[in-house]
Structure formats: C-alpha cells, structure tokens
C-alpha cells in the first residue's frame, strides 16, 4: 500500500471505474465505463508506469480488503468479482498505438 496514486481524482473523468457494492452471492461488483475512456486526456494526466502501479495497487486492495470483508459478511470464502463493462460509446478507434504499448510496458515493470 505504499504507492500513492496522486492523479486518481484527475484521471477518473477520463477513465471511470471502481467497485460499487456486492451482488446477490456476495461478490464485489466492479464497473468500468469503457465507452467514456479518453486515452489522450489520460496520457496528459498520468504516465504509463503510474497507471500500471495503480492497477497493481487496486488488485492488492481487492485481494486484501474487499475479498476479506465480503467473505466475513457472507459467511463463505469470496475470491471472485462480478465485472460490468459498459461499452456504450466505445469505438475501436479509441485504441491507439500508445494504448497498446501499455501491455509491453507491463511486462517491463512486473
């Protein structure tokens, strides 16, 4: 948890995502509004290394906090999420060379 994603609030309008409650069987619900992603604005706000570190941190928080809390409340082991991807407004043209380069960047920092 030592990483501090200082640009989080600035990024959220251009990449809206997050956890919102639980489903009927107690899994955390993750919602990502992919159609609202604005890659150009994200790159103005944050660099690739920081963005990937924020992904890693959010996964750690999911593993250490969300799953533990959901398991305790539901009385059974919870280790999966329900993901909702809202693709309204999404276009393949939103994916440019810089977006694809994130995959290559991830292999360098992991």
Image (cartoon, grey):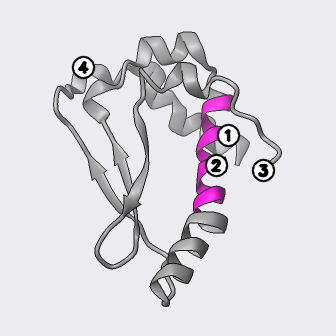
Dominant SS in magenta: helix
Q: Nearer the viewer, residue 94 or 75?
A: 75
The residue that disc 2 covers is 56
Is label 3 in a helix, a strand or a loop?
loop
Distance (Cα) linking label 1 and label 4: 26 Å
Q: Earlier in the sequence, mark 4 or mark 2?
A: 2
Rendered location of residue 70, percent (x, y): 50, 74
Residue at the spot x=66%, y=58% of the render?
60
Q: Earlier in the sequence, mark 3 or mark 4?
A: 3
- Give the answer, above or below, for where 73 lies relative to 94: below
Q: Earlier in the sequence, mark 3 or mark 1?
A: 3
* Left or right, residue 14 beside residue 65: left
Label 3 with label 4: CB-CB less than 8 Å: no
The residue that disc 1 covers is 53
| Residue 59: quarter of image | bottom right
Distance (Cα) linking label 3 and label 1: 11 Å
Label 2 with label 1: CB-CB less than 8 Å: yes
Q: Is disc 3 surrounded by few (<14), some (14 to 19) or many (20+) residues within 10 Å?
A: few
Is label 4 in a helix, a strand or a loop?
helix
Label 1 with label 4: CB-CB less than 8 Å: no
- Give the answer, above or below, for where 77 lies relative to 47: below
Q: Residue furthest left?
A: 88
Distance (Cα) linking label 2 and label 1: 5 Å
Q: Which residues are magenta?
A: 49-62
Q: Earlier in the sequence, mark 3 or mark 2?
A: 3
Distance (Cα) linking label 3 and label 2: 10 Å
In the image, residue 52 lies in the stretch drawn in magenta: yes
In the image, residue 104 lies in the stretch drawn in magenta: no
Residue 1: numbered disc: 3
Residue at the spot x=24%, y=20% of the render?
93
């Amino acid at each position: 948890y030592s990483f501090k994603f200082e640009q989080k609030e600035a990024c959220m309008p251009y990449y809206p995502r997050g956890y919102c409650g639980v489903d009927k069987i107690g899994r955390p619900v993750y919602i990502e509004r992919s159609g609202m992603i604005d890659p150009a604005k994200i790159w103005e706000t944050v660099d690739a290394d920081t963005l990937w570190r924020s992904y890693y941190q959010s996964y750690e928080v999911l593993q250490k906090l969300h799953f533990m809390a959901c398991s305790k409340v539901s009385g059974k082991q919870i280790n999966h999420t329900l993901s909702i991807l809202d693709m309204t407004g999404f276009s393949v043209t939103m994916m440019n060379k810089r977006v694809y380069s994130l995959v290559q960047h991830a292999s360098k920092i992991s």
